[in-house]
Amino acid sequence: MVSPLTFQMYYSTTMLIIVLGGGAGTISGVVFGSLLFVGLSEALRIAPEVRMIAYGLCLLALVFWFPKGFAPLIDRFWSFLGERK
């Protein structure tokens, strides 16, 4: 059942970070972003206040240093591995 509680600020922020962090428009980036940020969320489950601060810092880092997300880094990594063979 869909209700307004489904879209709380925490869940909306998590989805935004996963999509932007992985790289919008790429499947591999979104999968990587979900693994990374859900893992971060689970690691910080004991301190919810710290979790939101960490999410805010992640968003700032993504906006300033990784505007296209982690997808270009993943692509470079795979191309580097392909060149080594």
Image (tube, rainbow, N blue to C red):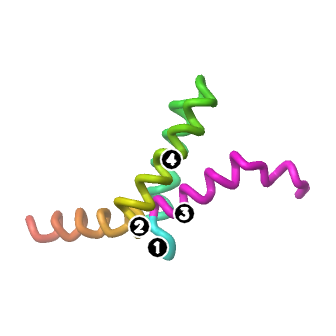
Which amino acid lies under the numbered mark 1 shown in the image of this protein? Thr
Q: Does the magenta segment cover residue 18?
A: yes
The vertical placement of 18 against 51, above or below, is below
Question: Which residue was labeled with disc 2?
Answer: 67
The numbered disc on residue 16 is none
The numbered disc on residue 26 is 1
Are there few (<14), some (14-19), or many (20+) residues within 10 Å of tag 3? many
Q: On the rendered image, what quadrant is the C terminus found in?
A: bottom left
Question: Which residue was labeled with disc 4?
Answer: 37
Label 2 SS: loop
Are there few (<14), some (14-19), or many (20+) residues within 10 Å of tag 4? some
Q: In the rendered structure, which disc, 2 or 3, sits on the residue that comes first in sequence?
A: 3
Q: Position of residue 24 (x, y in %)?
A: 50, 71
Which amino acid lies under the numbered mark 4 shown in the image of this protein? Phe
Are there few (<14), some (14-19), or many (20+) residues within 10 Å of tag 2? some
Label 4 SS: helix
Q: Are marks 4 and 2 in contact (CB under 8 Å)?
A: no
Which amino acid lies under the numbered mark 3 shown in the image of this protein? Val
Distance, label 4 to label 1, CA atoms, is 16 Å
The vertical placement of 16 against 76, above or below, is above
Q: Position of residue 25 (x, y in %)?
A: 50, 76
Q: Which residues are magenta?
A: 1-22
Q: In the rendered structure, which disc, 4 or 2, sits on the residue that comes first in sequence?
A: 4
Distance, label 2 to label 3, CA atoms, is 12 Å
Q: Are marks 1 and 3 in contact (CB under 8 Å)?
A: no
The vertical placement of 14 against 50, above or below, is below
Question: Which residue was labeled with disc 3?
Answer: 19
